Image (cartoon, rainbow, N blue to C red):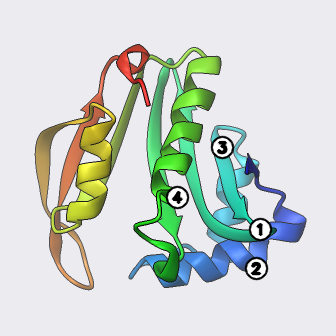
Amino acid sequence: MLREMIPETDMDCVAEMETQCFSDPWTPEMILDSHRTGLDTWLILEEEDEASGYCVFRTIAGEAELLRIGVRPPLRGLGYGKKLMDGVVENSRKNGVTAITLEVREGNTPARSLYKSYGFKEECLRSDYYRDPKEDAVIMWNREISNIYH
């Protein structure tokens, strides 16, 4: 089940998943600041009453940017990333979004494959964007999300 994040009850598990999923995790303060902007939507994926993944995306002027998406490491490869992406696309469509962008580590082949399955195209690289470890970022776009059918 996908639902919106409730900071008062979800902060600990989101912060924990951040540290499990990213070498540059957002702090609880960064997560709260993002939630408070009113521009960012946080979704939690629950399976059997346990948070298994989350995502956050920002919507401005008819476009969305996927900022973070994470699935607990033992649960990867089970389709949870797809469920989160379905939520991003569905929510974006409901809010009049026509295009979505994101950035992903060049070496994150599973994520890049997932995004390509949603019609995202690799448009450019940001050299040495990531640290720890140093890596390029691939900028991907789907400029017409009405064409996504999953």
Please state which of residues 77 and 43 is positioned toward the viewer in this rendering: 77
Query: Which numbered dot is residue 41?
Result: 3
Identify the element where label 4 is drawn.
helix
Identify the element where label 1 is drawn.
loop
Q: CA distance from mark 4 to mark 2?
A: 20 Å
> Which amino acid type is marked by label 4?
Tyr
Relative to 68, is 45 on the left or the right? Answer: right
Q: Are marks 4 and 2 in contact (CB under 8 Å)?
A: no
Please state which of residues 111 and 60 is positioned toward the viewer in this rendering: 111
Report the residue marked by disc 4. Answer: 80
Q: Are marks 2 and 3 in contact (CB under 8 Å)?
A: no
Report the residue marked by disc 1. Answer: 48
The C terminus lies in quadrant = top left
Please state which of residues 44 and 38 is positioned toward the viewer in this rendering: 44
How dense is the environment of label 2, judged by Cα within 10 Å: few (below 14), some, or many (20 and up)?
Answer: few
Q: Residue at x 53, y 83 (%)?
A: 19
Q: Residue at x 54, y 76 (%)?
A: 72
> Which amino acid type is marked by label 3?
Thr
Tell me which label, 2 or 3, sits earlier in the chain: 2
Q: Is residue 146 above or below residue 14?
A: above
